[in-house]
Amino acid sequence: MRLHIAGAVIPDGRRADILVVDGRIAEVGDRVDAGAATRIDADGLVALPGLVDLHTHLREPGAEQSETVLSGSRAAAAGGYTAVFAMANTQPVADTAGVVEQVHALGARHGIVDVRPVGAVTVGLAGERLAEIGAMARSRARVSVFSDDGHCVADAQLMRRALEYVATFDGVVAQHAQEPRLTQGAQMNESQLSGELGLRGWPAVAEESIVARDVLLAHHVGARLHVCHVSTAGTVDVLRWAKARGIEVTAEVTPHHLLLTEELVRGYDPRYKVNPPLRSADDVEALRAALADGTIDVVATDHAPHPPEAKECAWDEAANGMVGLETALSVVQRAVVEDGRMDWADIARVMSTAPARIGRLGGYDAPLAPGAPAHLALVDPSALRVIDTGHLVGRSANSPYLGATLPGAVVATVHAGRPTVLDGRVLDGGSDDADAGVAPRG
Amino acid sequence: MRHLLSTRGLARDEVVDLLDVAEGMADVERREVRKLPTLRGRTVVNLFLEDSTRTRISFEAAAKRLSADVINFAAKGSSVSKGESLKDTAQTLAAMGADAVVLRHPASGAAQVLAQSGWIDAAVVNAGDGTHEHPTQALLDAFTIRRRLHGADARGRDLDSVEIAIVGDVLHSRVARSNVWLLTALGARVRLCAPATLLPIGVGGWPVETDLHLDDALAHRPDVVMMLRIQAERMDAAYFPTAREYAREWGLDDARFGRLPEATMVMHPGPMNRGLEISARAADSAASTVLEQVANGVSIRMAVLYLALAGEHGRAPEVAEVGA
């Protein structure tokens, strides 16, 4: 199959045609010899490398009413993604080679995005003993990222051992940094607002103290550390200090922590309940600056689908989490591109190249080089969308952006040379049994 | 007034008017027939998803004195304890034609969620939500203070320059929160007093003074000392070491009570832990307003239900009748 992407703006700002042949970039230039190729008119569109999400919850196996590997793959494609790392907190937990191979195989069967399973650090995410990390690393799923996400590896000795043992397999521990005793029953950022609202506080120090401990541990044992969903200015300070010392730490920030603040909690609408919680405007500013200056390496969605009943209830009773795959690029554009802080080359780095490198995902190092796998996202940055449920192609609609106007739209996504999204619509990408009989959401 | 969800944001005049309506309701208490026909044919549901006999019977008495039909719905033994969601419960009550829902809920913000949910088109009165607010308690406290200070001339008055100390577990107290917003809206000066473990982070941004020691708070010679209930389980979570130490440092014991000027009011929202946050002598003294608070609670809740329901459909105000 030949694909001719005509007149796109590539990340370095040049206008170019891109020719894709047999799943790989064949040529990038002013005038490519397209021959008999399917043409995508990309006039006015930015051609980004296919986005890579280091932090996705696909919910399968175990919570298929919220999301499946297929529905999550489609949501990812709609957002311009061509690869996602699927977190381990499924039921059963992805703590064995069997589970990660199942998830990996489902992803490969649907073929919409590369689905790379994340393995649990500890058995059952219980934080007590190491899961079979070697077996997962050597399985057909080739797991390279290990995380108990949703739970912190709180025990210092266990974390030390995890860092050392995972490094043995050239993997990385992605830590959900949350000191459990400081956050028992926590409901929102601890602040003057939490005091007023009577919601139990989640203090910034509960994140910062774990990150500080872990960068020191990683340094001590000479291992890589990745910090999930950084949410506070203090964590940024710790990361900056660690990187200046040459410690091998990488970090991610979610789109929602780059845009939304705790003020949204004032109405007790559980759509804004997420862990770590939305923080202050000062934290948001620190996170944007840290992403721009490289202290934070990547944007990762923490896409967390939940069924309606998990959000149609009182705040304390609601589940944590927001869907984010479909809107991530728009939110990032609003947060750090519109004000000129970052350009599209920066976005290509923090949403594709860097996450692929952290996750040891091949094919993303030099995205537009001839011979590279053709993973691309074509974005119309001039679009302006009022987000509605029609834009959410995953199974769940727990988005904090419904009704909000966001810039930018993914017009096309190309995965391994094959379009998965054209004209903003996800192409039919097969079906799974769980999808049968489910009516489309209005 | 469509709903009463919190005292935050209530304006001074709005509160004074509500307290004045409650004065009218209190007058009814002195009549031979202590009942008004105002809410005849209207249905008030007391939806109490957390145990509270005192508040529930106060609302029940208030609704019945206004001739409303009252349905009591408690958590224990109900479908709620079997896992039914607030949404399903609310829709059930809506289908039964509830005009007002008086909600007590363990989760902060539950009343607001119910009011803005679209699940039910009834007036929502917050009867205590988690550690957020308990607006009718604050209203009855303000009403009690105003009556003690001004007696029969209370109507139309606010609490300008009245000094009020609120002492105890502010962190977990919805009564303290509602009182801070309401009393300051009425012009009172509020001091909060607690060990630092029981004051919320960010309390410096509230419109109050804070004292860490009770003797410091009392040294400001407040007109009102409001003692909050301290819960034994807080000890287990290391908010303070022992009940004995708490009582010694933050309890209104006989010695501290004896040093208060005679005119100082001693308040407590109940139920009291005698010997812990308040001594028996202080609780039973002439300075104590504890039983007035209970009586005034019914008048305040009559006023709230009246304003939420009778006002809603633009009926002619029956306050004239109330005051007759």
Image (cartoon, rainbow, N blue to C red):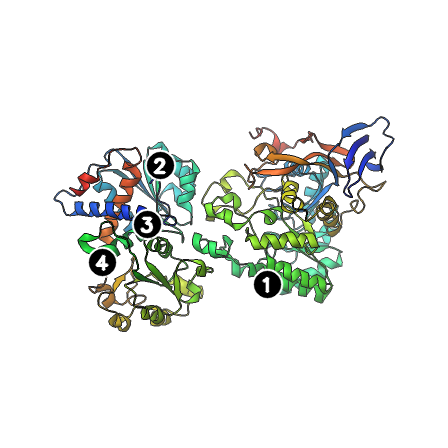
Which residue is under mark 4? B149
The local crowd at label 3, few if under 14, some if 14 to 19, many if 20 or more residues have their Cα within 10 Å, is some
The chain letter for the residue carrying disc 4 is B
How far is the residue under mark 3 from the one under mark 2?
26 Å
Answer yes or no: are tags 2 and 1 on the same subunit: no
For this orientation, the residue located farthest to the top is A36
Which residue is under mark 1? A209
The chain letter for the residue carrying disc 1 is A
Q: Closer to the N terminus: mark 4 or mark 2?
A: 2
Q: Is residue B139 above or below residue A234?
A: above
Q: What residue lies at 86% left-to-right and 32% top-to-bottom?
A: A32
Which residue is under mark 2? B122
| In front: label 3 or label 1 | 3
Secondary element under disc 1, as helix, strand or loop, is helix
Q: Where is residue A365 drawn, in percent x and y?
A: 79, 47
Which residue is under mark 3? B12
The local crowd at label 1, few if under 14, some if 14 to 19, many if 20 or more residues have their Cα within 10 Å, is some
